Image: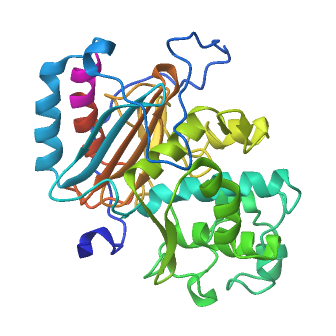
Amino acid sequence: MSAHKLIWALPLVAAIFIGCSKDSGASDEIEMPTENDALYFPPISTDIWEKIALQDLNWDETAEKPLYDFLEAHDTDAFIILKNGKIVIEKYFGGFTKDQNHAWNSAGKTLTAFTLGIAQEEGHLSIEDSSQEYLGEGWSSLTSQQEEQISIWNHLTMTTGVDYGVDNNFCTDPECLLYKNDAGTFWFYHNATYTLLDEILTNALNQDFRDYFNAKIRDKIGMQGLWVSLSYNNVYFSTARSMARFGLLNLNNGIWESEALLSDTVYLDAMLNTSQQLNPAYGYLWWLNGKSSFRMPGSEESYPGTLMANAPEDLVAGLGKNDQKLYIVPSQKLVIVRMGGDAGQLQLGPSSFDNELWSKINALIK
């Protein structure tokens, strides 16, 4: 695997095509599935995965090759589209195969968010708890009182108030964790405060968070993959199909086939919708489209308009460096995975590539 799939870089301010959109959350209406649109779940113990042809969906077959050409020109390794859980498109480039693992980078934050929800539901912690309870006094260079004010919820929502302007905002050593704002008063994409959630989970569970994740999520839905420690970061590596499985789990509101892995609907709703008003386009470590404004990694600015003008308004996404993409569109029952190298901007999350890619996807599915 090439180095650009493994190495993290310091955040850069994004340049993104900004569209205008009214703020919109998830619909309160629940549509009952028909026989034709009921979700399919691939078996967990085999490589079988049902497929559905473009022509059966009345999608535009003439847009398929331009999509592949675009993906290949932008250093893509793997691309999958699921409709109602079935594979419509599964394409690999440059010798990459369906059996190879790839870094999720920050798209893997979504795995941590889901794991925290299960841990809370099982009574191991509450996201309202002070993180000091699980990290111990002195996990930062803040005063003890300042530390006490930071909750697990603040770590989940990027609102800890810890200084993001240090030389290395991936660093989780106490000397790198300085006071800047009161907790809950400012939003900034601070990777170190996210990474500390792994230690919080491990201490709350009295077992390695990786083992808990494997038992509660990975093995339950037939994923494979592993967490790898790279400097301060814990990065998840898996196949593209495993990322698609996790997307399907979230598309179905935490239920895999008939088993609810996460039943806490309050947590699920907050995770996949606006969790705070400082950045309406952010839930619990998930990115949200269709909001009135958004903030970007590496920037203190708030930008008016929706995160991805070309994408459906109800899209939620796991987004990682080098344009790792996990898109979920509940209204269309779509899960879309893109893994690969940097598509042009070296961003930690959202980038202009999202809009460019969605213009190609729209041409296919319209």
- Judging depth in this view, the residue of 308 and 119 nearest the camera is 119
Q: Nearer the viewer, residue 162 or 51?
A: 51
Q: Residue at x 29, y 44 (%)?
A: 79
Magenta segment, principal secondary structure? Answer: helix
Indicate the quadrant containing the C terminus: top left, top right, bottom left or bottom right: top left
Is residue 179 a member of the stretch shown in magenta?
no
Taking the magenta stretch, the answer to whether it contains residue 365 is yes
Residue 155's spot in the image, x, y percent?
A: 66, 62
Instruction: Locate the N terminus by quadrant.
Output: bottom left
The x, y position of residue 38, in whole percent, is: 56, 19
Residue stretch in magenta = 360-366
In-image side of 358 versus 45 (left or right)? left
Q: Is residue 155 visible?
A: yes
Q: x%, y% of residue 55?
A: 25, 15
Does residue 102 appear to the left or right of 196 in the view shown? left
| Place of residue 64 in the rendered image (x, y in percent of width and height, measured from the top left) | 17, 28
> Farthest residue in the right direction?
123
Answer with the quarter of the image where residue 172 lies.
bottom right
Q: Is residue 191 above or below residue 153?
A: below
Residue pictured at 41% horizontal, 58% vertical: 299
